[in-house]
Amino acid sequence: MLCHVEQLGLVDYAETLDLQQAKVAQRQAGEIPDTLLLLEHPHVYTLGRNARRENLLASVEWLAARGAQVFETDRGGDVTYHGPGQLVGYPILDLTQHRRDISWYMRSVEEVLIRTARDFGIETGRSPGAPGVWVGNDKLAAMGVHLARWVTSHGFALNVNTDLRYFEWIVPCGLHDKGVTSLAKLLGRPVSMETVTASVVQHFGTVFGLDVRAAEELKSQES
């Protein structure tokens, strides 16, 4: 099965909400194949359906003065942060073509990120009741998804070279007793985003059994 990968660079969060909505509708109609959007966001805090406002430790106005936006979303989970140096992935998958099982889907996305971290010599794992990828008590990758007629949206955020200070203004994912980390922090050096992206794409195809193709490659074949 084909999967279309789009690497979008740095994109405003509001723009990707509209893009995801359009892609979901197209996938539901069978107009596009499964799609993986990979990108970075400017500084932004997002609140999921289950978010508690008190887990945002600063006012919207205070955060805005420091260049960070705040959005309420329809994904699962609590509050999290996105910003430069963090690889964000939005899979638009039709689970009727895979397995109609959201738990299987979440575990599969976690497996993609576990294998990616292993490529850099980092052993990660899961934490019961807390979706994402962990190194001990610190979260390396956060997850939050939405499902509409079995088509997924939202997804994961992998801390690569993320400025972790921005997490100090929230209770990440509503977990008071947990921390956050990044590939750069764990390795003690900056990490190539291009290399991390390539690793994620490779493992995404393997874990989900997809023939992963770049947007440019598909357009070339169609012309």
Image (tube, helix red, strand yellow):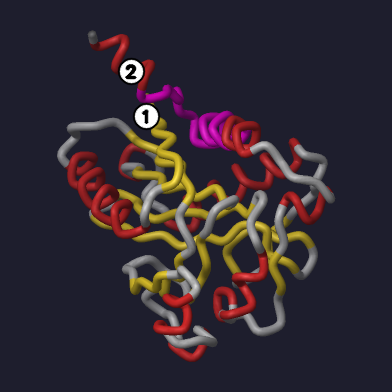
Whether residue 145 sits left or right of residue 88 in the image: it is left
Q: Is residue 168 above or below residue 59?
A: above
Distance CA(mark 1)–CA(mark 2): 8 Å
Whether residue 31 sits left or right of residue 188 in the image: it is left
Q: Amino acid at mark 2?
A: Leu
- Secondary element under disc 2, as helix, strand or loop, is helix
Examine the structure image and report whether residue 205 is included in the region drawn in magenta. Answer: yes
Q: Is residue 32 above or below residue 15?
A: above
What's the mark number on residue 218? Answer: 2
Residue carrying label 1: 4
Q: Residue at x 57, y 61 (%)?
A: 142
Comparing 43 with 186, the one in front is 43
Q: Position of residue 97 (x, y in %)?
A: 33, 37
Comparing 101 with 45, the one in front is 45
Magenta: main secondary structure: helix
Residue range in magenta is 199-215
Q: Residue at x 78, y 56 (%)?
A: 185
Q: Position of residue 144 (x, y in %)?
A: 46, 62
Within 10 Å of disc 1 (Cα), the crowding (few <14, some 14-19, many 20+) is many
